[in-house]
Every structure is written in structure tokens, then in C-alpha cells.
Image (cartoon, helix red, strand yellow):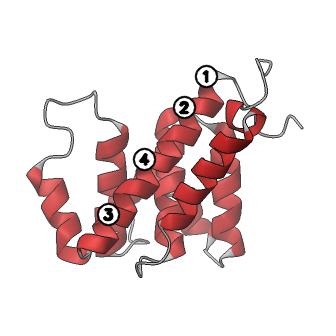
Amino acid sequence: METRIPNPALANPSTLKALIALAESTGDTGVPKTTHYLMHVRASQINGCSGCLEMHTKELRKAGESDERIFTVAAWRDTAYFTDAERAALALAEAITRIADRTDPVDDEVWNEAARHYDEAQLSSLVLSIAAINTWNRLNVATRQIAGAA
């Protein structure tokens, strides 16, 4: 597999600036950075984005996360490594990432469980963070950005 073109956001400084600003805007609500990184890893697994997987797993490791937590993000429901709040965020990330898979993609059960752990500002932060990673995933997958191919 070969990269088709460089990531379009990197070729357009205004777009890159806007996407970075979006990502940075989600960080001041009290949601731990590691929760954002876990969601980014899960969305990137679903979307098959190797570049984002590489980046966000490295961020988790740099943040001091254990290999067990990093390696089992895809199986978060079946491990004891994640808190209830992290599980709610991961379920929300999956639902928002897979919006075409169900008639009610973000059903009340998923939303209400997230709302049980996060206030309105934090929920907004999570939703924006998930939207941002899905944007990056789609840019990378469409143009075949390949991890380790530098």
C-alpha cells in the first residue's frame, strides 16, 4: 500500500490550524487527557487508521498508561482495566464513530451512562474530541497515510 497524497490538512495551513484548535479546545473541562486518548485509540481501531493508532498509543504510554490498558482498548468491555467513567466514554466514542450502523446510533442508554459520569461541559468535550479524531481518521484513511512509512 502506498500513500496517495500527503494528509490534506497538512497541505492546507488554515485547515490544519482549525483542526488543531478543535482538538485543543476539548481539554479544559476536567476530562483526563488519557480518557481522550483512549477514545482516540478506540475510534482509530474502528476506522482502521494506523497513523492515529500509532500516535495515540504512544501518547498513552507517555502518559504512564500500562501496556495492559493500551493493548486491551478494543476489548474494553471484557477487561477490568477501565473505570466506569472510561467505559462510558469508550461506549460513546464507539456509538458516535459507528453512526451508520444503527437507526439510533447514540441511544439513550449510551448517552445517559455518559451523562452519569460527565457534566454538560465534559460531555461537549467528549463529543467534540470524538468528532475531531473521526475527522483525522477519515483524512488519513482516504489518503492512505501509513504508520511507520516515514
Q: Give residue 83's quadrant in the image.
A: bottom left
Image x and y of residue 102, in percent: 19, 31
Q: Which residue is mark 4?
A: 131
Q: Amino acid at mark 3?
A: Ser
Q: Earlier in the sequence, mark 4 or mark 1?
A: 4
Instruction: Measure the C-alpha gap from mark 2 to mark 4.
Output: 11 Å
Q: Residue at x 14, y 37 (%)?
A: 104
Quick check: marks 1 and 2 in contact, CB under 8 Å? yes
Q: Which residue is mark 1?
A: 142
Q: Which residue is mark 3?
A: 124
Image x and y of residue 105, in percent: 20, 38
Q: Earlier in the sequence, mark 2 or mark 4?
A: 4
Q: Earlier in the sequence, mark 1 or mark 3?
A: 3
Which residue, as the protein is rendered here, is positioned at the far left? 108
Instruction: Measure the C-alpha gap from mark 4 to mark 1.
Output: 16 Å
Give the position of the C terminus as an image quadrant: top right
Horizontal relation, residue 123 to residue 22: left or right: left
Front-lying residue, 41 or 80: 41
Q: Amino acid at mark 4?
A: Ala
Instruction: Measure the C-alpha gap from mark 1 to mark 2.
Output: 6 Å
Horizontal relation, residue 150 to residue 22: left or right: right
